[in-house]
Image (tube, grey):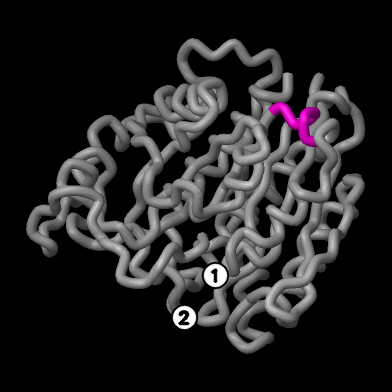
Amino acid sequence: MKLLHSGRALTAGAVAAATLMAGGSAAGAASAPEHPAAPTGATTAAAAPDIPIANVKAHLTQLQSIATANGGNRAHGRAGYQASLDYVKAKLDAAGFTTRVQQFSASGRTGYNLTADWPGGDADQIVMAGSHLDSVASGPGINDNGSGSSAVLETALAVARSGYQPAKHLRFAWWGAEELGLVGSRHYVNSLGSAERAKISGYLNFDMIGSPNPGYFVYDDDPTIEKTFKDYFSGIGISTEIETEGDGRSDHAPFKNAGVPVGGLFSGADYRKTSAQAAKWGGTVGQPFDRCYHSSCDTTANIDDTALDRNSDAIAYAVWELSQ
């Protein structure tokens, strides 16, 4: 997620004593089924598959290895980003997607976006799911945003494994240079004519979904997309909150500004968890949702598996629900 500015407030409201532990006090979460067939009241014609957390974590391990081999990061214009893009593209090509690499320039370096289209579906109604693939230069960017990138990748691969044939056309995307100011996604949106933009019935954005002290935040932009995510989490007994920390700071913003309906999920960055939030979700009161945000410690050790699992399944649920 793009850093808004330095010195930004780190509180999400009144914070209780910083060292108070809320333990496992997330009401309803402990006994809630992790992978229900469908949330209560859902009318999905084709049920979304469970997204294997082991597969998502395997992608994170690969991104970590890429960063380690390339100066400790996967930043725009550097070898680690190119290797990350090559890894994702190879997986998608092997699964039968039509992939395209779009080139742009930012800060004197060449950047790349990757899109992957699943054959079939109404080309005049496109559901997109995307995430930024670049890290900051100071770390490997495993939560920010290997988490979103890996979950979107595994959702795309689940589409291929299941042979899913939705009514709408599916497109997945991985953006470059988000950390420099949403450069890649803005370039993509600006490259589309008005008629092409009008074909996108929804863009779903996933930027940081495995934070180690997680919250469960839903974008409140398009009402239908928002309700879809809320229905999923309600079905597994998880309370959500409206996402405010990253509003306008990630790759949904260029789409929203162009009139495309947008939505997404977020597990928190450097705002601090309140006592009320810890009562709902567990975790540590007064500590950031991600203490390694934009730091060298944003490694594979900086991931909450439960949050990553739940959010990955929510992505698949929304992709299936909104594309039928």
Q: CA distance from mark 2 to mark 1?
A: 8 Å
| Residue 199 belongs to the span the image colors magenta | yes
| Residue 76 belongs to the span the image colors magenta | no
- Label of residue 285 in the image: none
Q: Residues within 10 Å of mark 1 (few under 14, many from 20)?
A: many
State the quadrant of the C terminus: top right
Q: Position of residue 188 (x, y in %)?
A: 77, 52
From this view, report whether residue 183 is shown above or below residue 13.
Answer: below
Secondary structure state at the residue bearing disc 1: loop
Q: Position of residue 191 (x, y in %)?
A: 82, 50
Q: Position of residue 259 (x, y in %)?
A: 65, 33
Q: Position of residue 35 (x, y in %)?
A: 51, 32
- Is 44 left or right of 18, judged from the image as shown? right
Query: Which image quadrant for residue 216?
Result: top left
Name the residue that disc number 1 marks. Answer: 141
Name the residue that disc number 2 marks. Answer: 296
- Is 232 left or right of 151, judged from the image as shown? left
Give the amino acid at mark 2: Ser
The residue at the point 80 percent across, 57 percent down is 114
- Is 58 left or right of 223, judged from the image as shown? right
Q: What's drawn in magenta, residue-wise?
A: 197-201
The residue at the point 56 percent across, 43 percent down is 312
Query: Which image quadrant for residue 87?
Result: bottom right
Give the amino acid at mark 1: Gly
